[in-house]
Amino acid sequence: MITAIKNKYAEIYRFLSLSLTALTVCALYFDGDSRVIKEDWGGLVDIMPTMSKALWVLVILSIAVNSVSILKYKRLNEN
């Protein structure tokens, strides 16, 4: 019973993590697109290099967190 409840929450957390990661990527591209349309080259130069590095780190962390929960779920089902 307890394992079923934990697994239910794990699926919700994986969904939230994936959704927030996707929305973050979309928001970054939207911001870049808005700055190009407005021809705000200074804003692009200031923001994009740092934001792209931060985005890489956050996406990799999201993948790692989801991988751990999936691997943990598989190990629980094997035992």
Image: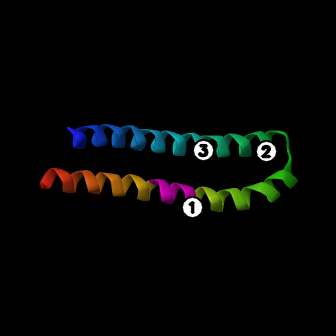
Find the magenta span and give its range. 57-62
- SS under mark 3: helix
Q: Residue at x 27, y 56 (%)?
A: 72
Task: Name the quadrant of the N terminus.
Answer: top left
Q: On screen, 30 above or below 54?
A: above
The quadrant in which residue 2 appears is top left
**x, y percent for residue 16:** 46, 39
Kind of residue at disc 2: Val
Sequence order check, earlier mark of 2 and 1: 2
Q: Residue at x 69, y 56 (%)?
A: 51
**x, y percent for residue 3:** 23, 43
Residue 60 drawn in magenta: yes
Q: In terms of secondary structure, what is the magenta stretch mainly?
A: helix
How far apart are the two marked residues, 2 and 1, measured between alpha carbons?
A: 24 Å
Sequence order check, earlier mark of 3 and 1: 3
Q: Nearer the viewer, mark 2 or mark 1?
A: 1
Sequence order check, earlier mark of 2 and 3: 3
- The residue that mark 2 highlights is 36
The quadrant in which residue 79 appears is bottom left
Q: Nearer the viewer, mark 2 or mark 3?
A: 3
- 33 lies left or right of 78: right
Mark 2: give few (<14), some (14-19) or many (20+) Cα within 10 Å: few
Q: On screen, 42 above or below 17?
A: below
- The residue that mark 1 highlights is 57
How far apart are the two marked residues, 3 and 1, measured between alpha carbons?
A: 12 Å
- SS under mark 1: helix
Mark 3: give few (<14), some (14-19) or many (20+) Cα within 10 Å: some
Kind of residue at disc 1: Val
Q: Residue at x 42, y 42 (%)?
A: 13
- The residue that mark 3 highlights is 24
Q: Residue at x 39, y 37 (%)?
A: 12
How far apart are the two marked residues, 2 and 3, measured between alpha carbons?
A: 18 Å
